[in-house]
Image (spheres, rainbow, N blue to C red):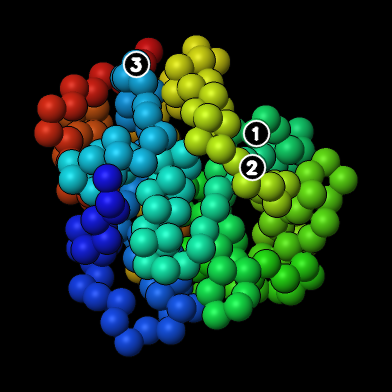
């Protein structure tokens, strides 16, 4: 089934890509996708299996105006970039934690090409990930206007995207530059979606990038960051669904949500 680029662009608040260079197209799509389609894993939390195949993902995130996590989000933008004439492929990736380092290959990023340069694309990480694509240029310090990043070789993985925090670069996510098949993503997505030990089944984790910052929610504890300043808040159980609908922007029609004990 051909990818409906017009519907996708409308979903992320873009009327057209006409007149833009390849790099401008990539940057505009990446930023608008990040700020219009929220990170959410309501389905695993509710016991609903998630598909990471292109057609179900398009139906969920574009047609039904839901959000999704990495295997969904980065599947969607991969299809969109290819439809926009930017050759793109997905790779399996690993998130790094300060206390444990790189974990299992339970993340997806994309590699694309624009104006003869290679770029790293990731719109499916709920943490402090870049809202603009990163040039695939080792050692180059890059800013998305919110954080500073660089790409470096790594021992555990071929490449590590690092983020600068407190003046020091730390591993954020790692990957091998090897295109993965849909079946590879499906296996790892099944673990993320269905394994009882998956964090997405145990905890309610939501975030949405905004024009000036970010909204996050872990259970009922939330935070709103605007231009680097973060305000913390706590929701009441009855406020959860309206918050997800009105502030995060998730179509909550037909979703019954009960917090785990």
Of badges 1 and 3, nearer the viewer stands 1
Badge 2 marks a residue whose secondary structure is strand
Query: Looking at the figure, which quarter contains the C terminus?
Result: top left
Residues 135 and 229: in front is 135
User: Can you say whether 108 is above or below 37 in the image?
Assistant: above
Of all residues, the one furthest to the bottom in this rendering is: 19
Q: Position of residue 56 (x, y in %)?
A: 29, 35
User: Can you say whether 21 is above or below 109 in the image?
Assistant: below
Instruction: Tell me, for residue 47, which label it has, or none.
Output: 3
Of all residues, the one furthest to the right in this rendering is: 155
- Which label's residue is closer to the chain start, 1 or 3? 3
Badge 1 marks a residue whose secondary structure is loop
Q: CA distance from mark 2 to mark 1?
A: 5 Å
User: Can you say whether 101 is above or below 133 in the image?
Assistant: above
| Mark 2 vs 1: CB contact within 8 A | yes
Q: Decide: few, some or many residues near mark 3? Use Cα within 10 Å; few <14, some 14-19, many ≥20.
A: few
Q: Position of residue 93 (x, y in %)?
A: 64, 42
* Image-based side of 135 in relation to 42, left or right: right
Residue 260 occupies which quadrant of the picture?
top left
Say if residue 192 shows up in the picture.
no
- Which label's residue is closer to the chain start, 2 or 1? 2
Residues 83 and 153: in front is 83
Instruction: Tell me, for residue 176, which label it has, or none.
Output: none
Residue 139 occupies which quadrant of the picture?
bottom right
Residue found at x 74% / y 53%: 160
Instruction: Tell me, for residue 105, which label it has, or none.
Output: 1
Say if residue 111 shows up in the picture.
yes
Residue found at x 79% / y 49%: 158
Mark 2 = which residue?
93
Residue found at x 24% / y 27%: 237
Q: Position of residue 201 (x, y in %)?
A: 44, 20
Q: Decide: few, some or many residues near mark 2? Use Cα within 10 Å; few <14, some 14-19, many ≥20.
A: many
């Amino acid at each position: 089934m051909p990818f409906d680029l017009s519907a996708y662009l409308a979903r992320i608040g873009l009327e057209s890509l006409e007149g833009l260079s390849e790099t401008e197209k990539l940057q505009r799509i990446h930023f608008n996708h990040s700020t219009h389609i929220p990170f959410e894993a309501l389905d695993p939390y509710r016991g609903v299996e998630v598909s990471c195949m292109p057609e179900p993902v398009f139906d969920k995130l574009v047609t039904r105006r839901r959000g999704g996590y990495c295997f969904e989000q980065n599947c969607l933008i991969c299809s969109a970039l290819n439809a926009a004439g930017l050759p793109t492929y997905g790779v399996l990736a690993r998130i790094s934690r300060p206390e444990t380092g790189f974990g299992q290959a339970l993340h997806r990023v994309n590699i694309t090409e624009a104006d003869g340069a290679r770029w790293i694309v990731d719109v499916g990480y709920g943490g402090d990930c870049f809202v603009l694509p990163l040039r695939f240029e080792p050692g180059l310090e890059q800013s998305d206007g919110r954080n500073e990043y660089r790409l470096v070789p790594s021992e555990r993985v071929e490449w590590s995207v690092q983020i600068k925090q407190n003046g020091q670069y730390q591993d954020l996510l790692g990957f091998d530059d090897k295109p993965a098949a849909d079946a590879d993503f499906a296996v790892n997505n099944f673990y993320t979606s269905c394994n009882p030990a998956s964090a997405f089944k145990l905890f309610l984790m939501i975030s949405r990038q905004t024009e000036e910052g970010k909204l996050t929610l872990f259970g009922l504890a939330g935070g709103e960051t605007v231009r680097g300043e973060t305000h913390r808040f706590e929701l009441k159980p009855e406020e959860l669904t309206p918050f997800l609908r009105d502030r995060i922007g998730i179509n909550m029609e037909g979703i019954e949500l009960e917090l785990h004990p």
